Each structure stands twice: as structure tokens, then as C-alpha cells.
Image (cartoon, helix red, strand yellow):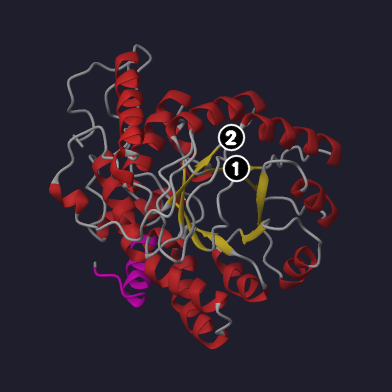
Amino acid sequence: MPASGTAGSASSSGGNRSGSPYISTTFRFAWLARAIGTRLSWFKGGQATPPKPPFHLPAAHHSCAIRGSISSLPAAGSHLGRKCPARGYTGAFASARNLPMIKGSIVELVTPADSNGAIKFESLEALVDWHVVEGSAALLVGDTLDAALDLDAEERLELWRRVVWQAEGRIAVIAGLSADQLETSLEFARAADEAGVDAVLLTLPATPFPSKDKLLRYVEAVAKAVKQPLLLRSRAERIAPSTVDALARIEGVSGFVDGASDITRARELLALHLPVGFALYAGNDLAAMPFVLEGFAGGVSTTANLVPRMVRKLHDAALSGDRAEAEALQKPLQSLLQAQPEDNLPRAVQWALIEMGRVAESTPPLALSQAKDYASLRRALRSAGCAI
């Protein structure tokens, strides 16, 4: 895929901050025609032909072999249908709402971008391949960690489409729909569907925190608009277990990400009689290990941006009930998490990825808010086994 900003089409009049050509109507029809042609080719000789991205990619981007096999053809409108690694979702998609439960580490991906907001698409594609190799279960793209990029629906469409094509069915892609206004979330939902993501996530509003009835109506409106499984996330406020139970019974809602850290909360949610297949996830890295040991399906992790294999191993150990192994892995992860400055976490994560050689340098170079943050992050990265 060409580097951002190098292809020959002009940017939109509003200024496309994504750093790549404006997605024209012609491009969309070409992309759709290619996708339809690929799906039709699956029926030739009874064998499935893996689709290829609509751009020429350097050989380095295809160094990761696709693991697994196709167990059945996907329904019209669904994603690629390939099996992902055993730690992620493990079945072909029978319908847009029938995504098998994701278990393990969901990486809340920090989208690499320059200081002007232009996305570094080549670095983004390399990160997708890296997370496939490291065994992450899914990638959450374009949610609250990317709020600073201020991407509109058109730019999110391009972001999600690029990630979906690079993932090639090897890892689940979850689109973040979170926004200040319901109408904006609905607009993002349409873009996510067009991009072909596997699931979507909505962070519930916290300020002002709505009443139970308003919250249910809000989620029902989004659930009706989306065509993929919908995950909900609560961060700033603790939602009553009875409200979580009511949310879980809304058609299309498939999981809940809880931001609490105390084990009592995990046990309260696990005691609910939730629908079969409904998944509970930890909403922060510190809670992931104890919550998964109690019975959660996994967790959404920001630290997995930097040490995806270690986070994956922690989830593997916790899912298998190996408390000793999980606790041993928690210690270096906790040091790394504490070294990340809270005032600008996305910038700190991207700076660390640049130090690790995973993301291209920025111009001008990224700067952290305090001088001590550089040394703290470097020490934590080295203690976690990262080569910098």
C-alpha cells in the first residue's frame, strides 16, 4: 500500500487529515466490484480464494502467513469468514450478528499519526501484522484513545477499511463508535458497516450520566442501526448490575466492558443470568488478570500496544486457570502501565512504539509532557523485555 500522502489523488476540500487520498465515488465502486468478484470466485471449484487488498503492498507486509482455514462460506454482507488463531474468535461468520465470542486480549490500538493528525498508514499496517503474529485476539480501532485525531466518518471509513484489508480475516477488527452525540455514533456505525468490520464498540456516555431509561433508549437506537455485534463499555461511572442485565437483553448487544477494578464488581456481574453467548470483559489492564480468573472472557488493553505477546500470555494463563503464571506475568505489566503518563497516553504509547522501531519517526519528533517520563518509560520497556 502506498505511503500516506503519496498517491496521486487530491485531498478533499475540507482537508483530509488522514494523510491519504480522498476516497472518491470511483474508488468505492472499484472496491465494491473487487469485493463482489472475490466472493463469486469462492464458488469456483468449491474452494475459497483469499481476497487481496485493493492496493499493491510491499512484500514485507505479507510476511505473516495466514493461519487457520475456512470452515464455511460467509453469508452475504459478512466479513471474510476465515478462522482466526485459537486465542481469538474461532468460527466462520454465519451472519453479521453471529460473531463467535472473542476471548483474550483486545488491543485498544493507538493509531500512529503525525503531529498534524495525518495517519501513518504503513506503520498502521505493520502494527496489524505484528499483533497477528503476537496472538492478540482483536483490535479495537478508532475509539476514545484516538479522540485527539478528531476523525470524521469519511476518515474513519478509510482507517477501518485499511485495517480490515490488512487483517485479512486473521484477527477480529472492532470499530469504535463512541461520540458526544447519538447522531454522530449512528454516522460512524454506517461507516463501520461499509468498511466490513467484525464488531463495533460504544463507550456509554458518562457526563452527564443518563438515567436507566435514557441509557436503554440510547443503546437501543445504536443497536438498531448497527449490523455487527455491539459491545458496550462503561468507564467513568459504575452501572448497576440490574442495568447491565437490561442492556444485555437488547437485541444485537453481545458484550459489556466494565471499567471497575475491584473483584467484588466482577463477581456481581458474573452472578447475573446473562444471555447465552454474552461476554464480559475487563476494561483496564490492572483488572484483567483477576477478572478473567473469575470468569470474564478477556480484557481491553492499552498496554498490549507495546507488549502484545506478554498480555496475550497473561490472558491465556488466566483463561486456563493458571493463577501462578498469570500473577508472574502481571508484575512487569504493572510496572509498564504505571510508567505511562496519564495526561496523554496515546502520545506516550506512540513515542514508545517509535523507540521500539515499530512506528516511523514523526516530524517534528514526538515530545512527552515531562522529562522524567522518557527515562521511566525506557526502564519499564526494558524490564518487560522490549528491545529499544
Location of residue 102 (image quadrant): bottom right
Location of residue 18 (image quadrant): top left
Q: Residue at x 72, y 39 (%)?
A: 207
Tag of residue 71: none
Q: CA distance from mark 1 to mark 2?
A: 7 Å
Q: Is residue 71 left or right of residue 353?
A: right
Q: Residue at x 22, y 48 (%)?
A: 360
Check if residue 207 falls in the magenta segment.
no
Residue 336 drawn at (x, y percent): 43, 69
Tag of residue 227: 2
Along the line of sight, the residue nearer the viewer: 329 or 83 = 83
Q: Is residue 319 left or right of residue 213?
A: left
Q: Amino acid at mark 1?
A: Arg
Q: Tell me the magenta residue range.
A: 373-387
Residue under label 1, please give it: 97
Q: Amino acid at mark 2?
A: Lys
